[in-house]
Amino acid sequence: MIAGVAAHGVVPLEYAGTSGFFLGLAIAAHATGWPVARGGSQRVAAALVSCLRMLGGDVVSGSPIERLDQLPPARAILCDVGPRELMRLAGARLPAAYRSRLQAYRYGPGVFKMDWALSEPVPWRAAGCRRAGTIHLGGTLTEIADSERASWNGSVPDRPYVLLVQPSICDPSRAPAGMHTLWAYCHVPHGSPADMTDRIERQIERFAPGFRECIVARHAMGPADMQRRNRNLVGGDIGGGASDLAQLFRRPVAGLHPHATPVPGLYICSASTPPGIGVHGMCGHNAAVLALRART
């Protein structure tokens, strides 16, 4: 059985409009499918940079910032980082009480991600899956729930719930002629060193017999690899922190304006702020609104 489910965190009432927008995106995705950027996800970033430059902005890359003191003077600094990175970057600028609250912020399960180069499309039993860009892969709803619960409770699921994307189905430019690309991930306990390669491939093979015979090459990344590539992915958590009731009103801290910090002009605008995880840009929007209000 192929089952599709999605779990979304809840956000403070102040951001009800924002969360409604996010919910609308989620519903649309379930109704019509998750979008795939033609030519690769870099095209999305390039389009955003183009818009920024049209407005007089610019992007500087290849210059890692280790401390906020390295930045030129500015009326507002918006940090698209997690709480731990904010503490590292701001250092003593942040009051001790605020740092203590940030340190209490909790992270959720990590992910184990895989990428494949395939000689042919995935041989799904279900015809509909051969046309789908995104597939939520699992058995019964109970099996999926058990898998997700296990990763939260520190256990490695034997039959993981796998979110899988086959972009070359709808964008042939993602692979050489006649070949295909595929990527997928599953949840694992926070910071888990477990190698999920065999478990993920067995789960795909379960619904697409002969899948392994299509594999030309594979690449895997566990939680530690994720965090090495991006320090904000603490323990492999790609969601910017646990999205549960305990952090409903403190993402990253409790307050009417969680995007603002005690330092004038310094804001946090990552998925560790409302409305949380999602490709929606609303975390940055909310922080920008506060920054603009402070200027008036």
Image (cartoon, rainbow, N blue to C red):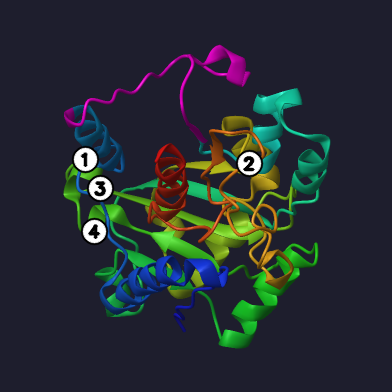
Q: Earlier in the sequence, mark 1 or mark 2?
A: 1
Residue at the disc numbered 3 = 179
Judge whether residue 104 can be spotted in this image.
yes
Give the residue drawn at x 49%, y 74%: 6
Q: Nearer the viewer, residue 122 or 65?
A: 65
Q: Secondary structure at mark 2?
A: loop
Q: Is residue 177 left or right of residue 198?
A: left
- Please state which amino acid type lies under the numbered disc 3: Met
Evaluate if marks 1 and 4 touch, with contact meaning CB atoms under 8 Å apart. Answer: no
Residue at the disc numbered 4 = 169
Q: Which residues are magenta?
A: 54-78
Evaluate if marks 1 and 3 touch, with contact meaning CB atoms under 8 Å apart. Answer: yes
- Please state which amino acid type lies under the numbered disc 1: Pro
Give the residue drawn at x 69%, y 78%: 146
- Please state which amino acid type lies under the numbered disc 4: Ile
Q: Is residue 98 left or right of residue 171?
A: right
- Please state which amino acid type lies under the numbered disc 2: Thr
Q: Nearer the viewer, mark 3 or mark 2?
A: 2
The numbered disc on residue 186 is none
SS assignment for the magenta stretch, majority: loop
